[in-house]
Image (spheres, grey):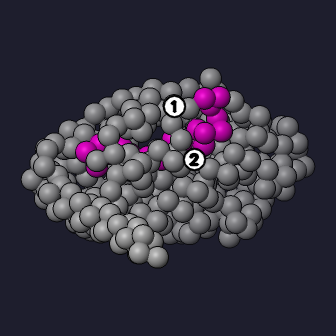
Amino acid sequence: MQGTRFLDCSIVWALALAGCASFAGAQDYPAKPIRFIAPNLPGGPTDILARLIGQKLAESMGQPVVVENRAGAGGNIGTEAAAKSPPDGYTLVTGNNATFGANVSLYKQLGFDPLKDFAPIVLVATQPNILVVHPSLPVTSVKQLITLAKSRPGELNYAGSGMGAAAHLAAELFKSMAGVNIVHIPYKSAGPALVDLIAGQCQLMFATSLSVQPHIKTEKLRALAVTTGKRSRLMPELPTISEAGLPGFEAMTWHGVLTTGGTPPAIVNKLNTEINRILQLPDVRERLGALGAEIIGGTPKEFADHIQREIPKWAKVIKDAGVRLE
């Protein structure tokens, strides 16, 4: 009995020491520069987000935040580097619907586990895609588009901004939920896809709001709906696809910040509190708004739950569409 009591006390004492060590680590954090990996090329939304948040973290935390662009393999190279870093909060990484959603099903092998190898910090923002059609297509609503596609199976085609990209998978989800047969015309990026759509070589496309808004205003393209679960504050007149004909449809681009799995919760929570504060700064909201982003924020658990939902959702879409990348 006495030995059991001694063991119980030892366990309690060890847990208490661990808790104190974690708290002390959070109190001292950061004590050296922080590396912030953006697993994409400079200039894109992922890079801009990392630099914007990194600058604000450096100002408030008193340590340099060095943004490191490590592009390649759909974001997998930089994300793997973050996964293999020490679990101390000194390596951050931007994550999105590719690296922490679709890629686990798109690629035969990943050098990381998006669920086990990371500690989610905060879901920063979402970017709605917009379903647009060429003006020659005789539709002004999602329901009309579905009806037309069903009457002409295999005749309508959609421009894709890259195999396995968010726009491609959004269209495949649309095909599956609507029960229509529209043909994918793949492009290397959104730029040439939009050129051909505007020229009438393709009939429709799921594209980022930032890339198509100018063409909607000049009536070179017709917008039917946004892909988010609720209407975008940037284009509130557009219905969601869910309310316009496909209940439950949601396919958005999202961005978040994570660190290496095993990082002490106290450090994760400290970063979460600080980034949530940064997201409310007027200049940050203005900059992200200019990218067509809707600021989210929230807790680490809410972000972790979001990732847990994204992976199986896109796994089914990818399997049904037969998409596979090397």
Circle 2 residues within 10 Å: few <14, some 14–19, many ≥20: many
Magenta span covers which residues?
A: 89-109
Residue 137 lies within the magenta run: no
**Which residue corresponds to the image point at 37% horizontal and 58% vertical from the top-left?**
121
Residue 199: quadrant of the picture: top right
Element assignment for label 2: helix
Q: Which circle marks residue 226 in the picture?
A: none
Extreme left residue here? 62
Answer with left or right where residue 160 lies relative to residue 69: right
Q: Amino acid at mark 1?
A: Gly
Q: Amino acid at mark 2?
A: Gly
Q: To which residue does mark 1 refer?
A: 111
**x, y (%) of residue 172?**
72, 45
Q: To which residue does mark 2 refer?
A: 101
Decide which of 30, 256 is in the foreground and name it.
Answer: 30
**x, y (%) of residue 220?**
55, 45
Extreme top residue here? 326
**x, y (%) of residue 157?**
74, 37
Element assignment for label 1: loop
**x, y (%) of residue 112?**
51, 36
**Which residue corresponds to the image point at 65% horizontal and 28% vertical from the top-left?**
108
Q: Tell me: residue 76, above or below residue 91.
A: above
Residue 26: quadrant of the picture: bottom left
Answer with left or right where residue 210 lies relative to residue 88: right
